Image: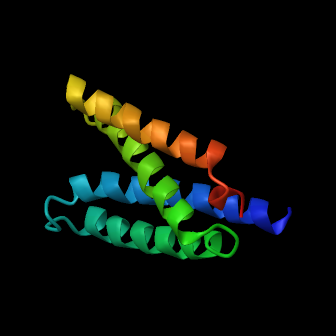
């Protein structure tokens, strides 16, 4: 796999690990439950480790914008599907803006084509 594709794959894995860590964070009950707390810490550490690999060929600003934007969208989706939380219209519009921003950055920014 070419190095740039490896970096994008690492970014994808970092996003999934961060979203999983955020899901366990809810279950940790403010770090009072051992296993969800441990999973949160391990998953966040692995997410940052994979993010560091992504930064080999993806500029920091682009990688972090995509990591946080996609992470927000996926975390919101998990909160609805898994934790049965609801999103109001303002939250949905905001998520739409986040998704639009990530798409614009990838489609039109010369920085993203690094």
**Residue 74 shows up from this direction:** yes
- Label count reads 0
Residue 99, compared with residue 109, is above or below; it is above
Taking depth in this image into account, of 105 and 23 the one nearest to the observer is 105
Query: According to the image, what is the colour scheme of the structure?
Result: rainbow
Residue 63, compared with residue 75, is above or below; it is below
Residue at the spot 13% in from the left edge and 63% down from the top edge: 30
Quadrant of the frame with the C terminus: bottom right
Residue at the spot 85% in from the left edge and 64% down from the top edge: 2
Quadrant of the frame with the N terminus: bottom right
Residue 57, compared with residue 96, is above or below; it is below
Counting from the top left corner in percent of width and height, residue 38 is at: 32, 71
Taking depth in this image into account, of 44 and 52 the one nearest to the observer is 52
Residue at the spot 40% in from the left edge and 69% down from the top edge: 44
Relative horizontal placement of residue 29, taking residue 57 as reference (left or right): left
Counting from the top left corner in percent of width and height, residue 35 is at: 29, 65
Instruction: Give the image quarter of residue 91.
Output: top left
Counting from the top left corner in percent of width and height, residue 22 is at: 33, 56
Relative horizontal placement of residue 56, taking residue 101 as reference (left or right): right
Counting from the top left corner in percent of width and height, residue 71 is at: 43, 50
Q: Residue furthest top?
A: 89
Relative horizontal placement of residue 114, taking residue 50 as reference (left or right): right
**Residue 87 shows up from this direction:** no
Residue at the spot 60% in from the left edge and 69% down from the top edge: 59
């Amino acid at each position: 796999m070419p190095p740039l594709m490896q970096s994008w794959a690492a970014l994808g894995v970092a996003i999934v690990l961060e979203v999983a860590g955020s899901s366990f964070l809810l279950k940790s009950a403010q770090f009072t439950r051992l296993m969800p707390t441990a999973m949160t810490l391990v998953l966040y550490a692995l997410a940052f480790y994979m993010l560091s690999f992504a930064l080999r060929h993806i500029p920091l600003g682009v990688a972090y914008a995509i990591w946080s934007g996609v992470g927000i969208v996926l975390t919101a989706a998990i909160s609805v599907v898994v934790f049965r939380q609801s999103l109001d219209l303002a939250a949905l519009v905001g998520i739409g803006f986040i998704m639009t921003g990530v798409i614009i950055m990838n489609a039109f920014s010369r920085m993203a084509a690094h």
